[in-house]
Amino acid sequence: VTLIRREDYLAPAFWIRSVDLSFDLDPAKTLVTSKMRIERNTAVAHGPLCLHGEELNVLRVLIDGESVSFRQDGDLLLIDKAPDADFLLEIRNTCAPEKNTALSGLYTSGGSFFTQCEAEGFRRITFFLDRPDVMAVYTVTLRADKAKYPVLLSNGNLLESGELDNGRHFAKWHDPFPKPSYLFALVAGDLVAREQKVRTRAGRDHLLQVFVRRGDLEKTEHAMNSLIASMVWDEARFNLPLDLERFMVVGVSDFNMGAMENKGLNIFNTSALLASPATATDADFSRIESIVAHEYFHNWTGNRVTCRDWFQLSLKEGLTVFRDQEFSMDMAATPSARAVCRIQDVRQLRATQFPEDSGAMAHPVRPDSYAEINNFYTATVYEKGSEVVRMYQTLVGRAGFEAGMKLYFERHDGQAVTCDDFAQAIADANPGSALATRLEAFKRWYSQAGTPRVRARGVYDELARTYTLTLAQSNPASPGQEHKLPQVIPVALGLLGAEGQALPLQLQGETEAAGLERVLVLDQAEQRFVFINVAVAPVPSLLRGFSAPVLLDDGLSDAELLVLLQHDADAFNRWEASQRLALNRILAAVRSGQALQLDTAYLEAMRAVLKHAGLDAAFKELALTLPGEAYIAEQLEVVDPQAIHAAVEAAQIQLAAALREDWIATFEANSHTGAYSPDPVSSGRRALANLALGMLVLDAKAQSRADAGVWLGRAYQRFKDAGNMTDRLGALAALVNGHAELAEPALAKFHAQFKGDPLVIDKWFALQARAAEQGGRVFAKVRQLLQHPDFSLKNPNRARSLIFSLCMFNPAAFHRADAAGYVFWADQLLALDAINPQVAGRLARVMDRWTTLAEPYRSAALEAIRRVATKPDLSNDVREIIERALA
Ligand code: HT7
Ligand code: ZN
């Protein structure tokens, strides 16, 4: 594959200042006419005008009304004799939306037209300088059959609409804000809208619309509420108001990702938009809230200030993820619910980004090269990028960060900029801060891949009453990066006495203690911090709130972890202690090859959490959920997925048995949450009830209890009678994961009940593909489900629900000693690549960490990867991932 390199960036030779687009929409052949006002960029040496265009049929090219000679070279259209003075370029071309299974560019779904232009989809619609630093003002006219496509939408404001001959009609839209082509969108179809008029704090009126297919209107209330809450929050927290009279959101069921922030016309995967208590779980409600917010926040961070080039992707994505995470925390309201949000975000980071950062696709937050930009919409760019933004806030404080954001918009509104510009604005707004004084070193977070390791060891001197904490950092080699320099790592910490009391923190050289929590800045390979006037030997609570995306080795004993679990003022670190206690035991079993045996100290600590009157249900559920298998694998040099799974399963069975009475009490206390509301308290109770039920069903089966039928029966009853999808799916999952005989009839009933709702059928597929493996039954079931009439590789949600669920989220079912999982992966990958390379590129990532696998998995995985590599017509997307895996 050919690599595009960050260091080769050149400004464009031409600017496109405005574009007038018109579309004669037809599924088989859509006619596109584009009239562009173009200027030479005088700062750049002369050269031909070179436009991008893929899978287009060009009909004519005119400059200032005269036909002009042009040539086509692969996916480029070149005009050698472009004038020096400003000119009008008119291009007419056709494209074929109904043949577009890649879902990039203009495509049809369910009989309507949609676009997806990020990152490089606009060039599949018409010829253009399809790069984010070329920002133009768009006027768009849509023409289509009125009966089939009564709704015609594009970015900005509706200028006019009306009737045409032959049953066709038109609509003309104008977006006053210059934007890069990746933010262009159009939608044409038979849709209906939920509408809401709102007045912002700034006193301006806006029309909000959520467009969906007719039957889905009642499932849009939550999205609309989330949109309004996002608007209110962005104005209150960052002083950023909505800048458009009309803000539209549209749902589509064929979509490559979650949603897209096109200016004023966000397009959403229906899975990230539609929710009703009967069809969506608490997790769906919360995901919808955060994705609606994320896309809305892009209106400033991404749209008003955009990226100069795609290497800067984290400029908008990391920052916008940070903003949506902050929004969700602020919406959660109570300190405990905020901590739950943080824990969930960190769990996600560890499950996806940490493995990415130590695998074949490891790359810096600002990558140095790519073959296919679609492969770099990664957990590193998004989630680690967000952690980097969070560290800015930690280093300059919340007010300092808000001042930095203000300066960023003052300097760069309307521009396409770089991560350096962002860093500079935050630093300049906070002169003398811990950030500004270390800015160049801090920026290593953008250039160095890999998860830094931080080793922390403390020594208490009873006589001197000092506590010396030594922090050391290292970062193992990543592909193309042998040696790393020290990074700037904010370490938030507190010190606790053995009884759990918080100790005042005074560093050597300071005249008085500065509170009970503070942030140390580790910026050397090794540093010592001496705390004075420490009355008792402390237990350090380090990296509070997960203040940096690192792997921490604090060397704490079980006794010390138990102190933190019981007393830490930082709820994140209380949870972390619960995970560490479990992790230590699981790792010991996996490393020794011995069967896992949970000890009383651990079990009693977990019982205490479960019975604790002062802890929220949501927190209990998180603390009693064992660490994910991907995160466990991250701690090991050589990974045997079956051994990890066996240890986790054993831990679960023992936890289920030892705490049985408490699980029963927990279930009884939390299983009735009344009329459905997705608020944190009720969703926390539902989560805990579902965990308890899962444990009780597992225990009934595992221990062959005499009264096993009671809990199996109760689970089935709850599945049948549930008043909401969270309870129903939770009970169904308990039966499926417990391999209960009642699972099959329950699955059949579920399918019959929801067969008209594709998003629920996705859950039905996913639940079966993610089920706890037992003797190859899950894998066999997935193969069988491939033949199910409801299965299709063409719909990304469906492909994800079955194939990705197995290959990415069910290690024990996927990593088989007979290699059948890898053969399955290769077959599905090749089939998917012919349909949708972007989605196939994601599936290819399953093998990122094959080199760490133990035998026989390693050799078998390599064979499957090699088989894919030999396929001659692989997409660029898949080829890049496969080549990196084999490098
Ligand atoms: N900025 C968007 C990223 C994106 C995308 C969305 C849908 C389909 C294909 C896509 N490629 C890239 C989504 C976001 O981060 O908000
Ligand atoms: Zn985004």
Image (cartoon, rainbow, N blue to C red):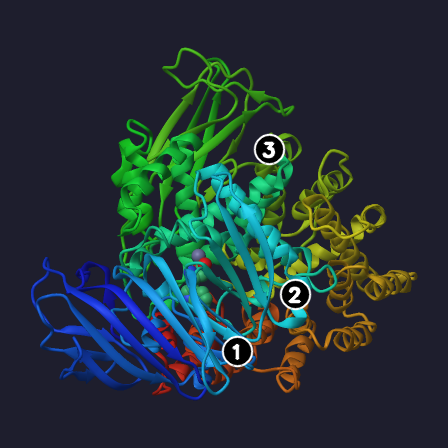
Mark 1 vs 3, N-terminal side: 1
Task: Judge whether residue 817 can be spotted in this image.
Answer: yes
Q: Residues within 10 Å of mark 1 (few under 14, many from 20)?
A: many
Q: CA distance from mark 1 to mark 2?
A: 18 Å
Q: Disc 2 residue type?
A: Leu
Pointers 1 and 2 in contact (C-beta within 8 Å): no
Quarter residue 131 falls in: bottom left
Give the quadrant of the C terminus.
bottom left
State the residue lying farthest toward the top. 511
Q: Disc 3 residue type?
A: Glu
Q: CA distance from mark 1 to mark 3?
A: 65 Å
The spot of residue 322 in percent (x, y) is 46, 46
Q: In the rendered view, does 699 fall on the left or right side of 391?
A: right
Q: In the rendered view, does 44 fall on the left or right side of 862?
A: left
Pointers 1 and 3 in contact (C-beta within 8 Å): no
Q: Which labelled disc corresponds to residue 614?
A: none
Ligand 2 is in which quadrant of the figure?
bottom left
Q: Which labelled disc corresponds to residue 217?
A: 2
Is 572 drawn above or below residue 597 in the view shown? above
Is 389 drawn above or below residue 310 in the view shown? above
The spot of residue 539 in percent (x, y) is 55, 28
Q: CA distance from mark 2 to mark 3?
A: 53 Å
Q: Which labelled disc corresponds to residue 149?
A: 1
Q: Residue at x 80, y 70 (%)?
A: 740
Q: Would you say the beta carbon of the disc 1 residue lies within 8 angstroms of ligand 1? A: no
For label 3, the residue is 560
Q: Disc 1 residue type?
A: Tyr
Q: Residues within 10 Å of mark 2 (few under 14, many from 20)?
A: some
Nearer to us in this view, 254 or 49: 49
